[in-house]
Image (spheres, rainbow, N blue to C red):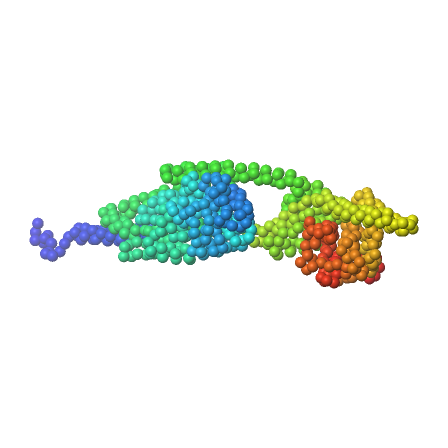
């Protein structure tokens, strides 16, 4: 080769530059692609790690709520037994006269069975007596919301079940509590249920181990803990360190999640508040789950990604993304399956089963839930059978029971005794309202009564009804308002009983009592006259006493004839009677007397018991027995006062002291001088008429008989 073929000094060949260019191009492309893939993978990794945290916390929330739902069902199944136990404690409280120190709680505890403890809590929120000594003297004022709850219970009436909670002292065993106020509202009676078996069941339902499995599945979760709303760990009932306690109190106060960053140690702590509070209960079963994430682990993983990208570039990135994708899908699949199946079961399909999974831990959880659902299914069946039994039992009760809705007034229950008592079959009542069944005036009275009932939550109406629609029978009725948990009216409960025979007995007692006393008094008068006649010397003087005995004999005959007429005519149903006629009939029953009896009465009739003449006779007989010669006159008058009619019986021969004005109407009051007034008040009360003594001591008696509107009528203008 000649000199012209040698390349000039300092120049490179085309292949060199092409190679160099390709190398630079390849390095640039690979470098750009590597950097681009790394940044993309880093962002994707950060997003996936965040999503993993979110998914972990959502799974913790779902598992906790699922366990709470199961615990609620088990919790509610114990309420009936708890209410029965508290009723026994309340009876013991009444037996001791309201003295907790004298109550025999140990005997009641023994009767209730294993695991029960009894507590007596005073108005200051302190446990003053209990069968569970570790909590004696516990002061609930240190728990303001719970002390407020106890105060509401003490000032209320009824049964108040609580949730299953962990005890504050000891090892934090699970216990079920229920409350009932004493009738005098001085104390709250508390019944607790616990024990090894009860604790074991609730530990399985608490969900702590499920949360452990969920959190351990997150590789960046370094540690975790679950706390209750008292700031104690649910696994060992212990308190945490001061700093954590501050964070817990902030979460409990705001009831919101909280995130705490610690950049010096590359840690992030999430406080997750799971709100399980139910306003129906005093206890708050909410949980705070604390999860600490190690950010160093995330950074270490990113550093490894850089090495992998430098060594295997795109292959490592693609492979890592695929692995991460399948791992995340595999981690969440079992929980998604369980949550889906649990949702179907919660919807009411108790025959549905939790599907099996490849994970042994989730397999145990699925098996446990299936076992729990089977138990609940059996419990629901038993509750349904009990409900049928209770309904059938109520239907066969000898008293009439009916229930109607408060919102639309429709009747929803009408037992067999109601059909017989009110002469209306249930098929014509259920779904109907008062407007469909009764006259307009009766509907107006019922509607007014219902409004008054619901305006006063503690009001219970007792009343006696009798009208032509009930064949003249007398019915004792109790009306009770029923409110929902939010305080709104729900139902009206009515309990009725036919007391016609009791009314007959009451009237017969009065009739026989008065007749017996009057006959004996007249016989005493006759005996006195006959004895005095024997002492007379002339026939004319003896004849005067014989004539006086004839008056007493005629009085006895009139009373016996009147009694026979009432027995033959019936003394059950009230009727319209003239006041003057009844008063005149009463005076005819009286034996011979010297009292001046007068009446200033218009032509007016009242709707009263057929024994109205006997009522006037009892007042007259008491006046003759007590006043005698001291009386200047007995007077009966009537006058209107507003819409009512007042019948006034006045006698200045005797009087009633202020302390005895109400006692004379008490049952069993009989001094030998004043008698029969209790039965008079009862007989008048059957038609809504009242009687009271309003006289002035030292002046005379003044019996005021008040007849309400609609129970009197004038046969001529007054």
Q: Is residue 244 at least partly visible in the picture?
A: yes
Q: Nearer the viewer, residue 148 or 646?
A: 646
Nearest the viewer among 329 and 224 is: 224
| Left or right of 677 in this view: 488 | left
Q: Is residue 648 visible?
A: no
Residue at image coords 84%, 49%: 532
Query: Left or right: where does residue 51 sit relative to residue 314?
Result: right
> Residue at left 58%, top 51%?
483
Residue 419 is left or right of residue 221, and the answer is right
User: Is 109 on the left-hand or right-hand side of 449?
Assistant: left
Seen from the viewer's position, the closer of residues 232 and 655 is 655
- Residue drawn at the location 68% of the way across and 44% of the way down: 497
- Which percent across, then down, holds residue 508? 75, 45
Residue 424 in the image, given as x and y percentages of width and height: 71, 43
Residue 356 falls in image quadrant: top left
Q: Nearer the viewer, residue 692 or 165?
A: 692
Q: State the quadrant of the C terminus.
A: bottom right
Residue 521 position in % (x across, y down): 79, 49
**Image point 36% across, 46% down: which residue?**
236
Circle count = 0
Residue 208 point in image, percent of width and height? 39, 45
Q: Is residue 642 above or below residue 210?
A: below
């Amino acid at each position: 080769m000649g000199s012209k073929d040698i390349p000039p000094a300092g120049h490179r060949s085309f292949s060199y530059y092409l190679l160099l260019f390709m190398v630079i191009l390849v390095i640039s492309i690979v470098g750009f692609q590597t950097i681009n893939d790394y940044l993309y993978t880093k962002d994707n990794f950060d997003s996936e790690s965040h999503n993993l945290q979110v998914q972990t916390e959502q799974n913790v929330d779902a598992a906790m709520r699922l366990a709470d739902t199961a615990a609620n069902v088990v919790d509610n199944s114990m309420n009936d037994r708890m209410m029965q136990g508290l009723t026994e404690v309340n009876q013991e409280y009444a037996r001791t006269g309201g003295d907790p120190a004298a109550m025999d709680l140990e005997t009641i505890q023994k009767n209730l069975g294993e695991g029960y403890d009894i507590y007596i809590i005073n108005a200051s929120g302190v446990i003053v007596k209990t069968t569970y000594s570790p909590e004696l003297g516990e002061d609930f004022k240190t728990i303001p919301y719970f002390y407020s709850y106890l105060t509401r219970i003490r000032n209320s009436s009824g049964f108040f079940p609580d949730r299953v909670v962990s005890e504050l002292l000891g090892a934090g065993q699970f216990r079920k509590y229920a409350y009932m106020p004493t009738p005098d509202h001085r104390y709250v009676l508390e019944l607790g249920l616990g024990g090894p078996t009860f604790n074991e069941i609730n530990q399985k339902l608490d969900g702590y181990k499920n949360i452990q499995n969920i959190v351990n599945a997150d590789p960046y979760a370094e540690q975790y803990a679950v706390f209750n709303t008292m700031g104690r760990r649910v696994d060992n009932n212990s308190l945490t360190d001061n700093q954590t306690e501050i964070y817990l109190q902030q979460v409990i106060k705001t009831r919101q999640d909280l995130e705490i960053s610690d950049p010096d140690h590359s840690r992030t702590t999430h406080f997750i508040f799971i709100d399980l509070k139910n306003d129906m209960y005093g206890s708050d079963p909410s949980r705070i789950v604390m999860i600490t994430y190690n950010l160093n682990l995330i950074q270490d993983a990113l550093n490894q990604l850089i090495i992998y990208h430098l060594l295997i570039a795109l292959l490592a990135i693609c492979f890592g993304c695929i692995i991460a994708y399948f791992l995340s899908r595999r981690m969440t699949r079992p929980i998604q399956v369980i949550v889906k199946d649990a949702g179907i079961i919660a919807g009411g399909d108790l025959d549905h089963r939790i599907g099996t999974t490849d994970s042994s831990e989730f397999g145990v959880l699925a098996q446990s839930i299936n076992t729990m659902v089977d138990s609940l299914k059996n419990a629901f069946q038993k509750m349904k059978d009990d409900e049928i039994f209770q309904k059938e039992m109520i239907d066969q009760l000898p008293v009439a029971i009916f229930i109607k809705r408060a919102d639309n007034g429709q009747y929803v229950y009408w037992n067999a005794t109601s059909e017989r008592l009110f002469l209306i079959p249930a098929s014509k009542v259920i779904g109907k309202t008062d407007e469909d069944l009764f006259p307009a005036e009766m509907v107006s009275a019922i509607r007014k009564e219902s409004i008054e009932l619901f305006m006063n939550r503690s009001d219970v109406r007792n009343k006696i009804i009798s009208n032509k629609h009930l064949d003249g029978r007398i019915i004792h009725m109790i009306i009770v308002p029923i409110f929902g948990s939010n305080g709104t009216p729900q139902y009206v409960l009515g309990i009725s009983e036919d007391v016609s025979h009791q009314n007959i007995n009451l009237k017969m007692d009065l009739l026989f009592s008065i007749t017996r006393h009057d006959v004996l008094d007249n016989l005493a008068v006759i005996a006195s006259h006959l004895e005095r006649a024997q002492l007379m010397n002339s026939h004319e003087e003896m004849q005067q006493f014989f004539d006086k005995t004839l008056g007493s004999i005629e009085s006895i005959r009139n009373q016996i004839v009147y009694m026979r007429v009432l027995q033959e005519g019936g003394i059950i149903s009230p009727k319209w009677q003239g006041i003057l006629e009844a008063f005149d009939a009463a005076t005819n029953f009286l034996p011979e007397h010297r009292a001046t009896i007068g009446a200033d009465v218009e032509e007016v009739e009242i709707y009263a018991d057929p024994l109205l003449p006997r009522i006037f006779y009892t007042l007259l007989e008491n006046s003759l027995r007590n006043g005698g010669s001291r009386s200047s006159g007995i007077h009966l008058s009537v006058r209107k006062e507003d819409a009512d009619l007042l019948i006034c019986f006045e006698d200045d021969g005797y009087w009633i002291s202020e302390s005895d004005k109400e006692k004379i109407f008490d049952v069993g009051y009989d001094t030998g001088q004043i008698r029969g007034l209790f039965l008079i008040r009862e007989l008048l009360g059957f038609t809504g008429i009242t009687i009271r003594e309003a006289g002035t001591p030292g002046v005379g008696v003044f019996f005021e008989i008040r007849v309400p509107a609609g129970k009197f009528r004038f046969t001529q203008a007054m």
